[in-house]
Structure formats: structure tokens, C-alpha cells
Amino acid sequence: MENLPVSPIETLNAAIQSYNPFKNAGIVKEQNIWGKGFPDLASLNKKASDTVFKAIEQVKTSQLSHEKVTSLVLTAQQGVGKTHILSRIRHRIEREGGGLFVYGNVDKYTDLNLIKYQFQQTLADSLRYIGSQGVMQWQEVAAVMANQGFKASNPNAQPLTPEQLVRKFDEVYSRRLAKNRNLMDELTRQVRRAKTNAEPYIVRAILWTLSETQAPFAIRWLSGDELDQSTAEYMGLPSNANKTNQDREAEALNTVLQILNLVSHYNPVIICFDQLESLKVNNGGFTTAQVVAELVSSLYNTLSQSELGQGIVILTVMLPDTWANTVNLMVGGVPDRVSKYTERKPIQLTPLNGKSMVDLVSLWLQEELYKPNQLIPPHPVYPFEESQIKELGKGKLTVREFLEWCAENFKVHIPPLPEDPEERFELALQRELEAETGDALDNNQLIADSLCFGFGLLKGQILEGETLTGEKLNKVAIKELVEVTPKNLNNGWINFKIIGTENGKQIKIGVAVIQSKLYQLTVGLRRLNNYETFDLTRGCLVRSKSKTEKINKNSEAAKLLQQLKTEKGGEHVDIIEDQIRPLLAIWSVYQKRENYNLSEEDILHFISQKQIVFANNLLREILSDPSGKSNEDSVEDDPELWKEFESSSSDEIADADDGNLYDEFN
């Protein structure tokens, strides 16, 4: 940082004024565990998280069956960082692999008399989150199972990635069903050759998670919930119908054990119980902490791990008083089973000191404010002073208390704004235009919001002429911008729909911004090509050709894109940075209008006056009549991929026997 020029102080102060990275940062919520976590200062409570990772390594590598399951207790006062440690563990596993993560927020358990059934739901729900391979954790397990099945029937089979299996699963299933061959029967049989003790229905349900269409139902079944009869019959699973909650509670532990024994055969499982301080009690008068401790003890006692298994670690998080005055006093060996790895000694977290406070603020500002905006501050903790922060360290604040202090004191002295509204608009626009786009060009929603805002400003105007690529604007008029329905089928892939006229004829343009990987692009293009379901007359893919992954010529994405352009009359519009930047800027100014003392009417007036939107070529390209150009520079050949398909025609695949099932996915 010393060798790089410091950003203009006006730009830094504008960024600080427009966004407080510490707002609501004091409380780590469940979404911070599963989604984008908070900045993680690796040195903070490093000993605690290292102990957990050592426990994971032990259960994974030990050859002793009694060491394949272990448990730990983590204690700290409110706000010290208990849930933050769980977030660190989850994100490291997601980043590096080597485990399946299960998180139980016990505060959400509504009935302590159904603790086993609710944990079954926790297990099923947790494994639906994305793992280290870019697919659901369920799908990671299912992919290993499927590959093991392929190997059992074909020793020459090479492992297929989860993405490959998910992408082609429904296609292969339908193709084989047309030949009176049931893919699920075949795979289940093959998997059970290698895992003879596995419960067939659970194997089947986990394999169904590879199906884009049936995965939600499979996860619902694995959670213990009911399926309608027709869905259950199609999937070859019991419907779980006509069961009371008490029935589900009675069956839950056995189902949980079978699931854990199976999935931990392929990867270590880390189970975390959090938020045990609820005042709820069960019918027996036992508190939340006691009920959870009994569950952990029961899991520890009954999990049957083979020496080849990858193991299970159970981590329970609680206040020191909860451990000392409740769990540690329970009889029947419960404390020993809840805290096995550290021999009944809880892992304790410690408050911050002056140095760790400075390091935390520096990291937080860098990750949440300066780096995303490509800004360089005069010193790492600007706008705070390091001496000021170190003085706070003497008070032994918790992480939560310190971050709350940062939120309240995060401010700079900003020079007065110009009196003239137009000058204030010019100042705001210039700041946003000069700001680096950073990760904005990877943010589908931000780009879509900016485009939608721009189109909204064109309502009621007539657009004519040509775009820079020579496409025609034939008296195009926008009437309204609407959400794409049915929402459950679109699932957000088509961002919005433009309804208007072209030469007096109604048009309905679906706009999908997809800067994501090819797998996501394929899913989005399937929706964009479905004019009938989503009531479109034209589909428009908005995707950068220079800043995104090239589309392989033989991929399904390339075929869908070709179909969109040649059969459907749709188009692929390139995102050019100079064209999207003004739209990002005016959308940002509009959102920050209160910071610049500008009214909505002021902003709309000045944007219109300066023709920022009317002349924008990106908007005009989307509205123009597609030229039918192939955009070949967005697609690239892959000779290796061709070789994969060269060896087997569709007829050969259709006639394949069980031993060649692997080839259909390859």
C-alpha cells in the first residue's frame, strides 16, 4: 500500500458517507454462516478454530472405530464471537473442501418434544446449501455415490464431476426411461454393491438430488416430510403420508443415523448446535440446553462408524454459565459425550485487545469498503485513529461491542454541498463515474437493476435510428416494465420484462443478465428460450464477451444460445464497460440521492436533460430488432470435447446396457 497513490480524500469521504460497513455488523446471523461471511481476522480466537479443525482431521484419519465420532463444546459470553467461529469453519470447508457442514440454530426449534425430528430437518436443510464444488452438499455426496456405482459395474469408468452429473441427469433419466430402463433402479443397485448396508430408500433419495426437477422433493423426503402420492410413486419412495409428528419423532433418530452413517462414509460431517439459551422447556421440564445435550449424547452413543468412514464431529456452542450450571451437571455421562475431544474441558473464547482491534478494523475496512471500490486510504484504519482504537482495547470489549462502537463513530467531516441542485447532481454523477466498477460487472442483479432503471426513464419516448452494431430501432416505445411470471418457474433467471410496441406491434422482451459460469448460463438460457411459459416475444441475453467465460461451441449453453438467436428471434447483447458505466452511475446516484440532498424529481430531470439514458447504446441494443449476427466471438471450439462425443452416437447411447451407463454422462 505504501508504494501506491492514496485515493483523493474527497472520493474516500464520499465512499464513507455513502456506506457504513459496520452497520449491523455486531451480530452474526445465520445468513452470515451460509452466505457471505463477515471479514475473518484469522488470528482472532485462532486456537479455538484450530482445535475444531484438528478434531476433524482426527476423525478423518484415525483407523480406530471409537475415534471416528467426537465432540466439543465452545463457550463465550454474548458478543465475543461464538457464531463467528462457526462462520469461519463453514467458509473454510466451503473454500477448501474436506467436509460436510450442518448448522442447527436451536432457537428456531419450535417444539422441544420433537427435537430428533427437527434435527432431521436441520440435517436435510443444511446439506442443500452449496459446498466446495459449486453444487449442493447433497449433490457432492450423490456424485461420489454415483461414481462409486459406475466403478462397480465398469472398472474403467473415470470419475465425473457433480456438475456433469447434475447437468445431464434429467436428460439421461428420460432417455433411458423411454427404453424401459429406470436410471434410479440401476444406480441404486450399483451403489449398494459397494455399500451393502445402506438403506435403499435413503440411497435412492440422495441420488435423486442430482436431478434439477426432483431434488426439492428428494430433500423434502429426507427431512421426514410428506410427498404427494404421485410424486412418491414417480421417485420410487414411500410417501411418508398419514404420519403424526409423534410418528416422525419416533422414526427420526434411526433415519438420521442412517443418513449420517452413509454420507460420512464419503466426507467428514461437522454438526454445529448454536443458540442454546432459549427459555423453552419440553413436556418433561427439561431446558433447551439439556434437551440438545441429550441429543448430542444420543448421537455420540449410537452412531456406528466403520474404520473406512470419514468421521463425525459435533460442536455445541453455549454461554459459560450454561455449561457450568446446566450441561456439566447432567448425569449419565452426558457431559463426557458432549465434550469428548477436549475431555470435558470447553474451548473458551477471549475478548479483544488493542492490537486485535486495530487488525480487525483494518481488515474490515479493506474487505468491505476500500478493496471493493478500489480505494487506497492514507492509513489502514482511516477514518479512525490507531491510538484511539488501542485506547479502547483497555476496556476488554467484546467483538460485538467494538463493532457497534465502530458503526456509531464511522464518519468524516464532509465539506458543504453546492447550493445549486444541478451542481450537486454533477458532483454526485462525477464521483460515481470516476468510481471503479470493481466487482460490479460480475453482479447480475446490480446490472439488471441499472438497466431496468434506465428503461424506466425511457417510458413514453419513441426510439428510432440505428445502434452502433447496425441494428434497427423501429419506432420502439416502452409502456411498462414488469416482473417475469410464473415466479416459481423463472426463479429469478429472467430479470424483468419490457412491454412496449415496435412499429405499433406489441413486443414483450425478457431481459436476462447472466455473467455467471456456463452451468448457470445454461439454466438461464433454458428459461429465456421458453417464450410460451413466460409470455415473451423476444429473449435478450445480456452478457459480456470479454469479461466472462467463453462459451464452448459444443456445450449445451452454445446450443441454447444459437436456438435463441436463430429459432426464437432473440439476441445476445454484449456488456461494454463504457456503455454500462453511465447506467451504473445514475442508478447509484438515485439510490444515494439523500446524501446529496437531491429529490427524485431533480435526478430524473437532470438525467433527461443530459440525454444520459436516451443516447445509451446498451439500452438501444436491447430494444433494437436483432440483426441475427451469430456473435461467434463469444463461442470457442474445444477439440477435446468433440472427441468425447465422437466415440458414441445417440443411437449407441440409447441401446447401451447397464455396464455402459457411465458413458451417457461422459
Image (cartoon, rainbow, N blue to C red):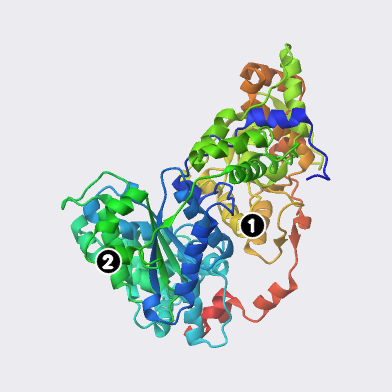
Count of marks overlaid on the render: 2
**Residue underneath mark 2:** 298
Secondary structure of the residue carrying numbered label 1: loop
Q: Residues within 10 Å of mark 1 (few under 14, many from 20)?
A: few
| Residue 422 drawn above or below residue 588 | above
Which residue is outermost to the top? 419
**Residue 566 has which mark?**
none
The part of the image, by quadrant, that contains residue 168 is bottom right
The part of the image, by quadrant, that contains residue 187 is bottom left
**Residue underneath mark 1:** 517
First in sequence: mark 1 vs mark 2: 2
Distance from label 1 to label 2 (Cα)? 43 Å
Q: Position of residue 151 (x, y in %)?
A: 51, 84
- Residue 576 or residue 197, whichever sits in front: 197
Work out whether residue 46 can be spotted.
yes
- Residue 189 or residue 664, whichever sits in front: 189
Give the residue drawn at x 66%, y 31%.
Answer: 16
Residue type at numbered disc 2? Ser
- Residue 89 or residue 227, whichever sits in front: 89
- Residue 585 or residue 655, whichever sits in front: 585
Residue type at numbered disc 1? Lys
| Residue 65 drawn above or below residue 219 | below
